[in-house]
Image (cartoon, helix red, strand yellow):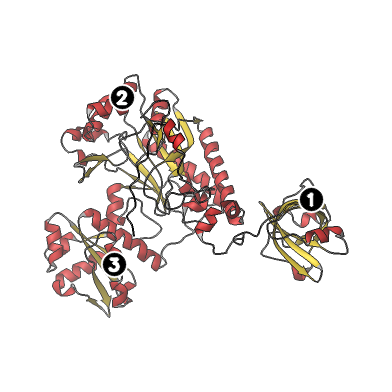
């Protein structure tokens, strides 16, 4: 039977029509010899009815079906009796009286109920992902993902960008995350790497005169995982020549505006807020701040430096800082509730967490006795503290203070109900440090990647103070997530060589890894820059999810395994012999 309609598309407009439907049996109910089946396909669910009065042999066949049987049915659309209307179902005003049925395939009893709202262990869902994908919520998410990809393509096509594919087998880079390596059978002892991004290829496309490029690219990074990361992921990769940074950012804002309007019906106001890296870290303790609520970090060095709190004075003397977070309304918390914040703060590097309650018109807490009346007044004025507030203090180096108070800000914001999940708050974070010093390796590392262009006025600092160089780099953040990042790129050989020198890469290593890029820079490379959007993460936020695995058809687990395919897995010795590889595995310690 050839399908004439989708299940979820039937409405009262089809009443009286003869229709043919294909789908899966979701539920079945036998009420006094009349059989009701909820039939499901990708579009939704509709109730079909088998009655001895009009179904004949079809009822006998239908009676043998079970959950997840695949069937084709033909019947007439009728209006439901008023008392049987289901307002929770888009098709709830109608049902289909079946006269013909064909069982296309039987099904074993599934290991879990295939419907939304049922708690199922995630590992079981991933093992039977092909069943999990039948759930309406998963179908909805995959459709959203497809629509989002089309919007990206349509917008970029309209702006004169062209879709260019770049290689998956590429060269391993010494910078960035660990590469996934692919041994070469033909070139014994040598390896390809799977791309962490198409970064160098897209720059070479700019050298090649492409001018405007994009690609929905698969990328691979062998790094520790978390809820919003996967070892293989998708990014929308964009590069353009002859476009200033501000113009590129404005174009990307229009892209986001269109994406959110056409997928979730949200009108984004332009332009997006812009913060420098220093401002974001200083005010919010994060380079990807959630701007849906306030709770800004407050600088306290000048007030507490000469107080009797020795740890404050000691930290400031060593070049550190003291900052405060005013948790409005939390001053009514019990001592235990306040003390419970300590272990949480310790996870982010805090050696302790000082606090002051404003209760019954006075400051209370272990450190209050070390302040003079003038200092108390200054703290009150600076923080805006009032009855019922809780002041939380962190004293350490800048990074630890930012990490601790930034994490507490998010936790308290959520606890106090300050975060509106229906709001989408975008911002740009700019002027990142170009380099960061790695204490373990005793050398500078690129904060983004080695091809990020420094601000023109900071180039001279390569010779005197590399750590002070600001990058022409920018991240686009949404509700506390980084959803994209990019930079203007180095396009002159002498500047790129200065960058490699700052990273302590030897001339031999530079020539081996990036010689082709330096050579390309001598053939008229245009000024260029770009951005890459984390497509999986954007879809996650559009879908209102908190886990990337919910937005990818076949994701890996948090331990980078594929439970469906049971991979990674051993391979045969013959395969390894062809690759000239021998595997050495240390025996696991006996328990």
| Residue 20 badge | 1
Residue neighbourhood size for the residue with mark 3, other residues' Cα within 10 Å, grouped as few (<14), some (14–19), many (≥20)? some
Q: Earlier in the sequence, mark 1 or mark 2?
A: 1
Specify whether 568 is left or right of 392: right
Specify whether 97 is left or right of 585: right
| Residue 135 badge | none
Up the image or down, 336 lies above or below 496; here it is below
- Mark-to-mark CA distance, 1 and 3: 61 Å
Q: Position of residue 243 (x, y in %)?
A: 40, 31
Up the image or down, 560 lies above or below 337; here it is above
The kind of secondary structure element at disc 3 is helix
- Mark-to-mark CA distance, 1 and 2: 64 Å
Residue depicted at 36% across the width and 54% down the height: 289
Q: Position of residue 560 (x, y in %)?
A: 43, 49
The kind of secondary structure element at disc 2 is helix
Q: Earlier in the sequence, mark 2 or mark 3?
A: 3
Q: Position of residue 96 (x, y in %)?
A: 79, 58
Q: Earlier in the sequence, mark 1 or mark 3?
A: 1
Disc 3 marks which residue?
343
Residue depicted at 48% across the width and 35% down the height: 215
The kind of secondary structure element at disc 1 is strand
- Mark-to-mark CA distance, 2 and 3: 49 Å
Q: Position of residue 354 (x, y in %)?
A: 22, 68
Front position in the image: 414 or 201? 201
Answer yes or no: is residue 55 visible.
yes
Disc 2 marks which residue?
515
């Amino acid at each position: 039977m050839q399908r004439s309609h989708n299940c979820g598309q039937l409405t009262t407009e089809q009443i009286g029509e003869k229709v043919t439907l294909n789908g899966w049996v979701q539920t079945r109910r036998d009420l006094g010899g009349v059989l009701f089946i909820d039939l499901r396909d990708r579009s939704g669910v509709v109730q079909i009815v088998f009655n001895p009065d009009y179904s004949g042999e079809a009822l006998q066949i239908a009676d043998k079906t079970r959950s997840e049987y695949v069937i084709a049915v033909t019947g007439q659309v009728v209006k439901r009796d008023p008392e049987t209307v289901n307002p929770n179902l888009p098709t709830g005003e109608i049902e289909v009286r079946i006269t013909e049925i064909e069982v296309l395939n039987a099904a074993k009893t599934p290991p879990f109920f295939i419907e939304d709202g049922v708690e199922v262990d995630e590992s079981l869902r991933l093992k039977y992902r092909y069943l999990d994908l039948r759930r309406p919520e998963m179908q909805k998410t995959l459709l959203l993902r497809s629509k989002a990809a089309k919007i990206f393509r349509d917008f970029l096509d309209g702006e004169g960008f062209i879709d260019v594919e770049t290689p998956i087998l590429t060269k391993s880079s010494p910078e960035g995350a660990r590469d996934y390596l692919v041994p070469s059978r033909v070139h014994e002892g040598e390896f390809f790497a799977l791309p962490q991004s198409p970064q160098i290829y897209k720059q070479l496309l700019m050298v090649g005169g492409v001018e405007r490029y994009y690609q929905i690219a698969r990328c691979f990074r062998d790094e520790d995982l978390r809820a919003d990361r996967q070892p293989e992921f998708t990014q929308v990769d964009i590069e353009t020549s002859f476009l200033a940074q501000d113009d590129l950012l404005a174009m990307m804002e229009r892209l986001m505006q269109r994406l959110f309007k056409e997928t979730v019906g949200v009108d984004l106001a332009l332009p997006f807020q812009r913060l420098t890296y220093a401002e974001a870290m200083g005010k919010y303790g994060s380079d990807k701040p959630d701007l849906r609520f306030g709770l800004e970090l407050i600088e306290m060095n000048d007030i507490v430096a000469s107080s009797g709190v020795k740890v404050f004075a000691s930290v400031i003397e060593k070049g550190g800082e003291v900052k405060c977070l005013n948790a409005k309304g939390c001053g009514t918390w019990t001592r235990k509730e306040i003390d419970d914040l300590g272990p949480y703060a310790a996870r982010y590097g805090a050696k302790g967490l000082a606090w002051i309650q404003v209760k019954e018109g006075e400051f209370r807490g272990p450190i209050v006795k070390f302040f003079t009346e003038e200092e108390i007044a200054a703290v009150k004025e600076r923080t805006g503290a009032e009855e019922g507030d809780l002041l939380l203090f962190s004293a350490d180096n800048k990074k630890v203070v930012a990490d601790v108070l930034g994490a507490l800000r998010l936790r308290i914001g959520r606890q106090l109900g300050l975060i509106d999940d229906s709001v989408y708050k975008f911002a740009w974070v700019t002027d990142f440090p170009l380099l960061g010093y790695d204490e373990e390796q005793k050398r500078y590392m690129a904060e983004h990647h080695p091809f990020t262009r420094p601000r023109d006025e900071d180039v001279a600092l390569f010779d005197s103070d590399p750590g002070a160089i600001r990058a022409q780099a920018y991240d686009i953040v949404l509700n506390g997530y980084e959803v994209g990042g990019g930079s203007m790129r180095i396009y002159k050989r002498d500047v790129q060589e200065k960058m490699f020198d700052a990273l302590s890469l030897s001339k031999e290593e530079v020539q081996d890894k990036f010689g082709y890029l330096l050579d390309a820079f001598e053939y008229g490379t245009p000024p260029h820059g770009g951005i890459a959007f984390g497509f999986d993460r954007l879809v996650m936020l559009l879908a209102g999810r908190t886990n990337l695995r919910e937005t990818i058809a076949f994701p890996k687990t948090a331990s980078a395994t594929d439970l469906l395919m049971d991979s990674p897995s051993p391979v045969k010795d013959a395969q390894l012999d062809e690759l000239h590889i021998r595997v050495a595995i240390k025996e696991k310690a006996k328990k």
